Amino acid sequence: MFDITSPQNPRIKSVMRLQSKQSERREQNLIVVEGFREIVLALKSGFESVELLVAPDVCDYDRWISLRNSFPKSYTLSADSFTRLAYREGSDGFIALFRPHYFVPGDFTGRSNPVFIVLEGVEKPGNLGAVLRTADAAKVDAVWLCDTPTDIFNPNAIRSSVGCIFTVPVLQTTSIEALQWFHENSVITLAAALTAQESYHQIDLTCPVALVFGTEATGLSDLWLHRADKQILIPMRGQIDSLNVSISVAVMVFEAMRQRNFKS
């Protein structure tokens, strides 16, 4: 017997609203996480578990057993009802609800020789997810989202980050707040810009540094271009003048890691 058999069940509809509406996630202070890997990463990162939804006909039994004691509530769903909820094709039969955790600038005061990624105005969940994968791979200290309405716990962002949204600290501030904090904490700000005169590999990236990126369409605001400590660029040899923002981030971040001999 399943706890929930109908796709029209009120619990199913409630979770679907959480998936589709940022306002609902904010109001209930809940996020929806799909997939065993992502759920495990959220648990390991200390996110508060609330509820587990499992499709026994779909999921791996041993994985189910490993998860169920980590949640105060759990429900079994028929395959039909789970399919209504599943956000991705080929879902593995696990969906969970967690309380979100939000970081603030003060959480990073006193970090030893940090590397930060700053994204201004980047809204596409796919780009954010790709940047978070790079941030996790390089083990940067945090990703700052400045002046962007992006919901960091949008299901698309969680999916495209393959769970790195839970392994990398992410915070949202205004650009002014970020600039002020970096300057007060002796973090060098390097703005990626097509108008820059120096290439990223010519810059010393072994000091506390924030690598700042804008959107592909408009680049960085005048605030960053005028007030960052320095502008840098990735030399382009072809006819296109820029890379996708997630690729630009990866190139510069791993140059910083190379200069640091891949040590923190």
Image (tube, grey):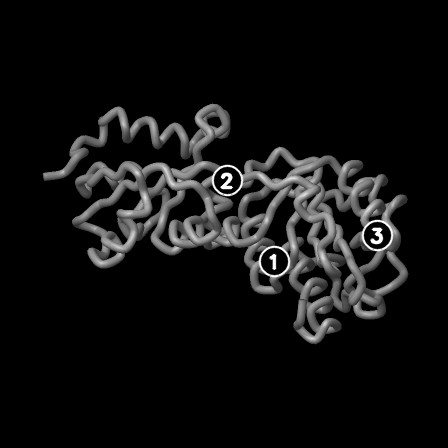
Residue 193 in sight from this viewpoint: no
Calculate the distance from the C-alpha at mark 3 to the C-alpha at mark 1: 21 Å
| Residue under numbered circle 3 | 186
Could you tell whether 136 is left or right of 258 in the image? left
| Quadrant of image for the N terminus | top left
Q: Quadrant of residue 66?
A: bottom left
Residue at left offset 66%, top offset 53%:
245
| Residue under numbered circle 2 | 153
Image coordinates for residue 136, horizontal then vertical, percent: 57, 59
Image coordinates for residue 260, horizontal then vertical, percent: 73, 71
Q: Which is more N-terminal, label 3 or label 2?
A: 2
The type of residue carrying mark 1 is Ala
Tag 3: Cα neighbours inside 10 Å, few (<14), some, or many (≥20)?
A: few
Number of the label disc, if any, that sits on residue 112: none
Calculate the distance from the C-alpha at mark 2 to the C-alpha at mark 1: 16 Å
Q: Which is more N-terminal, label 1 or label 3?
A: 1
Residue 182 in sight from this viewpoint: yes
| Residue under numbered circle 1 | 135
